Image: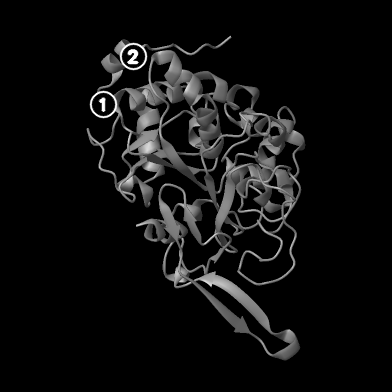
């Protein structure tokens, strides 16, 4: 059974040498240190081994489009690992390093993408236990910004695992979905974190409430020409359904994070989660924003919002507008973020904070 290698306050200091990206914090989001936690990296699953150097370089490359330039540090992890194995050790090591250095003394903000949502939930669940055992105060994590969060799992993981051993019998639709998402057909030897991503499993990991706000940024766009959508309930971003990215307490198919506004901002009645996990707050929604586009270079999408003015230790203030289209009985009202089509979703958030 896996066990975390515990570090005391003294030994933790001995291990703190190169992990903070710039040698010292640069505090580039509203004066707070930014920590990035990436998502699933399918290419790692296909390798026989993933070295520590590859975990680091892959983690850096994951954020190259935007967030990497604003990172004060990252939690890099291997997709070949189950969450409770090497990933847990890496999370522990980082937490003790940050606690020993006072990295989060003035407050930290975590930015996650996809499965990074689930990894971070585990970290938040354990960090007070880890720091207390090592003789430190808990990390002062102000908030987590979750882009396309997979904390509720992805039904694509079910598809991938349930088809193991039957590759010759796979339908064209299943082959297309797996090829688009993973680039290969999984075997029992290369599942890694996919097992944790099954919704039934993901929704049992570190689900105790905590006091760190989770701000959600979601999309309903199509990253893979629609080939994965048939396996995801309700509206999805090509990899995760809205029940996961919005932070819903159940895995029902829904079409928005709230029942009164569609992803494109239209004021209308729409299916939405009956309840969200404690301290989860949807902020931005993009009807055409796809999974990678939430942290990538995708612009041209007019974003809608749920919460446009939040203060979670850092202030998130969005400039919003109300517009109409159509006439008389066919008139529709839209609540959107002003000028958002000129920016990526990540840029809209960054500008709203800074």
Identity of the residue drawn at 41% across and 31% down = 76
- The label on residue 334 is none
Identity of the residue drawn at 72% across and 56% down = 272
Q: Are marks 2 and 1 in contact (CB under 8 Å)?
A: no
Front position in the image: 22 or 110: 110
Left or right? Give the position of 179 relative to 20: right
Q: Residue furthest top?
A: 1
Q: Is residue 352 visible?
A: yes
Left or right? Give the position of 3 relative to 200: left
Instruction: Report which residue position mark 2 lands on.
Output: 9
Give above or below for 3 relative to 127: above
Give above or below for 71 relative to 105: below
Q: Earlier in the sequence, mark 2 or mark 1?
A: 2
Left or right? Give the position of 279 relative to 260: left
Instruction: Report which residue position mark 1 lands on.
Output: 18
Q: Quadrant of residue 208?
A: top right
CA separation in Å, label 2 and label 1: 18 Å
Front position in the image: 246 or 55: 246
Give above or below for 190 relative to 351: above
Secondary structure at badge 1 equals loop
Q: Quadrant of residue 75?
A: top left
The way the protein has been coloured in the rendering is: one colour
Secondary structure at badge 2 equals helix
Q: Is residue 82 visible?
A: no
Measured as percent of width and height from the top left, residue 83 is found at: 55, 25
């Amino acid at each position: 059974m896996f066990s975390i290698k515990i570090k005391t306050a003294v030994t933790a200091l001995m291990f703190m040498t190169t992990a903070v990206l710039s040698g010292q914090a640069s505090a580039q989001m509203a004066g707070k240190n930014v920590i990035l936690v990436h998502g699933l990296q399918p290419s790692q699953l296909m390798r026989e081994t993933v070295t520590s150097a590859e975990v680091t370089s892959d983690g850096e490359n994951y954020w190259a489009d935007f967030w990497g330039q604003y990172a004060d540090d990252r939690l890099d992890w291997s997709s070949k690992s189950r969450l409770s194995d090497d990933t847990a050790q890496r999370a522990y090591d980082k937490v003790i390093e940050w606690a020993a250095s006072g990295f989060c003394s003035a407050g930290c903000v975590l930015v996650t993408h996809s499965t990074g949502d689930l990894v971070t939930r585990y970290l938040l669940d354990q960090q007070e236990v880890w720091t207390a055992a090592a003789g430190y105060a808990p990390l002062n994590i102000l908030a987590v910004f979750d882009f396309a969060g997979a904390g509720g799992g992805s039904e694509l993981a079910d598809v991938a695992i349930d088809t193991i051993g039957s590759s010759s019998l796979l339908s064209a639709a299943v082959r297309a979905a797996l090829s688009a998402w993973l680039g290969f057909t999984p075997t029992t030897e290369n599942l890694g974190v996919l097992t944790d991503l099954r919704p039934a499993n993901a929704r049992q990991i570190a689900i105790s409430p905590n006091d760190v706000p989770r701000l959600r940024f979601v999309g309903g766009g199509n990253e893979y020409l629609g080939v994965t959508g048939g396996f995801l309930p309700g509206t999805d971003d090509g990899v995760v359904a809205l029940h996961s990215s919005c932070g819903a307490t159940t895995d029902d198919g829904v079409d928005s994070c709230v029942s009164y506004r569609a992803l494109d901002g239209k004021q209308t009645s729409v299916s939405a989660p009956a309840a969200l996990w404690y301290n989860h707050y949807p902020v931005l929604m993009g009807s055409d924003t796809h999974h990678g586009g939430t942290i990538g270079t995708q612009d041209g999408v007019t974003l809608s919002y749920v919460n446009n003015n939040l203060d979670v230790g850092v202030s998130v203030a969005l400039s919003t507008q109300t517009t109409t289209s159509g006439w008389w009985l066919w008139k529709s009202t839209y609540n959107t973020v002003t000028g958002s089509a000129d920016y990526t979703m990540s840029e809209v958030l960054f500008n709203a904070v800074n």
